[in-house]
Amino acid sequence: MDTLIYYRRDLRRALPRKISPIPIRAARPEDEEEVRRIAAEAFRGYGGHYHADPRLDPMKADETYRDWAVRSCRGELADEVLVAAGEGERLSGFITLRLNGPEEVEGRLFAVSPEARGRGVSRALIVEALRWCWQRGARHMLISTQITNIAVQKVWIRAGFEPSHAYYTFHIWFD
């Protein structure tokens, strides 16, 4: 079981200022492997409902996030993937965005590589994601995480997001 908490940001309110020097851009086809690498590092053993279920293979749970990230880059699960440039050719993070309708964009998968954490990458990605949503005429952005992921929730609150709702996910096995 886990608890997924959703945050919502009203895009009619002033957007946070872009203060980070970290370059954020749309993912390109050649970024797919880097996005996969970040997903592999960031979600290895992640405390979501896949990893909370002792009956599921932890390696397959890890693969779920890598697959999600790659399929998002290919346009199957997201309308846009924004990436943060790291040092050299390496990327340091990404966020996938999906239009849920003309007024709502959802941040579906959000990750920063472990070596880049604490450097403002999360904030830079979320600020640029908000701008992307606003440019498409959306009225609000929705994003979610496990309730135990406090660090990213702090970033979102500082960017003007507010708690919206939560879901419990239960795995029940009938043997």
Image (cartoon, grey):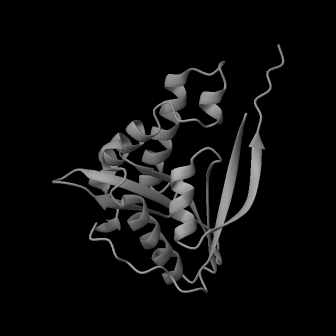
> From what the image shows, is residue 69 above or below residue 16?
above
Point out the residue furthest to the top here: 175
Would you say 147 lies left or right of 35 here? right
Q: In this view, does 64 lie above or below 79?
A: above
Describe residue 13's horizontal placement relative to residue 68 as left or right.
right
Residue at point 36% right, 43% down? 114
> In the figure, residue 154 lies in which quadrant?
bottom right
Q: Is the C terminus in the top left, top right, bottom left or bottom right quadrant?
A: top right
Q: Residue at x 38, y 67 (%)?
A: 124
Q: State the residue at coordinates (28%, 68%).
A: 23
List x then y, in percent, for residue 90: 23, 50
Dividing the image into 4 quarters, which one contains the N terminus? Answer: top right
- Front-most of residues 131 and 136: 131
Where is residue 49 shown, x and y percent of the image?
65, 35
Give the image location of residue 146, x and y in percent.
63, 46
Q: Which residue lies furthest to the right in this view?
A: 174
